[in-house]
Amino acid sequence: MLVHTDPFQVSNRLSGHSFGSGFSRSTMTGLRRRRNAVKTAALLALLTALIIVIGGYLGGATGVVVAALLSLGLNAYLYFNSDKLALRSMAARPVSPQQAPDLYAVVAELSQRAGQPMPRIYVSPIAQPNAFATGRNPEHAAVAVTAGILQVLSRRELRAVLGHELAHVYNRDILTSSIAAGLAGIVTMLANLAIFLPIGSGDDDDAPNPVATFLTVLLAPVAAGLIQLAVSRSREYQADQDGAVLSGDPLALASALAKISRGTAARPLPAESSVASQSHLMIANPLSGNGLSALFSTHPPMQERIRRLEQLALEPAA
């Protein structure tokens, strides 16, 4: 049950946290940015190590050299194109201010309130209500919403959701999460390719071990899921809080999350690899929550997120 409180009173109390440059000082601390930078570097290093190990296993010294060159290319590709991978997985298309004037107006207002650049805006045709942000920094960010979320949320609720997504951008955690998604997709792709590699060629002692290759194919998707799980769970709580401070309306975000939760449960997306590897970017888990998708869910419990937002609405200004 959502707590009913005057949103204008809540906004006035939360204004004690400050917006614009104050918002940056209070919520986007240098420590958090450095921590996300370290996570990003660690993920890229993991990708490099993984490719080199696989290259050495399959091709010896020559394989290591080829794998090292390949890893450099993949690292650069992920850094500059992780946003495109996420947007493509949801079939999101850019929209202009003429096509979505209300959406643009809300994002522009929140961006100005935070003193940050205007992100690119995309809409996905998917009927499930959901949203996500992607990009390597605020200057190259994109915010995407689904057609479903535009239908079920009020303008006030949509504004709160967009505040949550912009908080991800300003907290610099979308690059980490986008690279994690790309890494998960690459790991899964490498595992799938391993099926077609010549293995166990008779008496050749240097040939790859069929059992080891089988385990690689079996465990690679598991490793990809664990990578996402490690980097994503706590960031939703932080984005909820920071987004509520930015919008000044935690109860609108709580109400939106309740509607989104019901919508994703009613219209779960298929657990295809392209969707599954990007699911941790969404404001709510877009998958069914059954089987492996439940095991690797990167989202904290929705009821706990709503409870924290309700509590934030009752707190006095800091």
Image (cartoon, rainbow, N blue to C red):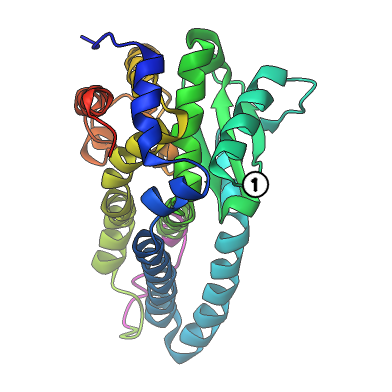
Q: Amino acid at mark 1?
A: Pro
Residue 199 lies in the magenta-colored region: yes
Q: Position of residue 209 (x, y in %)?
A: 28, 73
Tell me the quarter of the image containing the C terminus: top left
- Total number of numbered discs in the rendering: 1
Q: Residue furthest right?
A: 98
Q: Position of residue 168 (x, y in %)?
A: 45, 44
Quadrant in the rendering for residue 113: top right
> Residue at the spot x=54%, y=9% of the render?
151
> Residue at the spot x=29%, y=11% of the render?
5
> In front here: 179 or 277?
179
Q: Position of residue 143 (x, y in %)?
A: 58, 36
Tell me the quarter of the image containing the N terminus: top left
Q: Is residue 183 left or right of residue 119?
A: left
**Which residue is tagged 1?**
117
318 versus 179 height, above or below: above
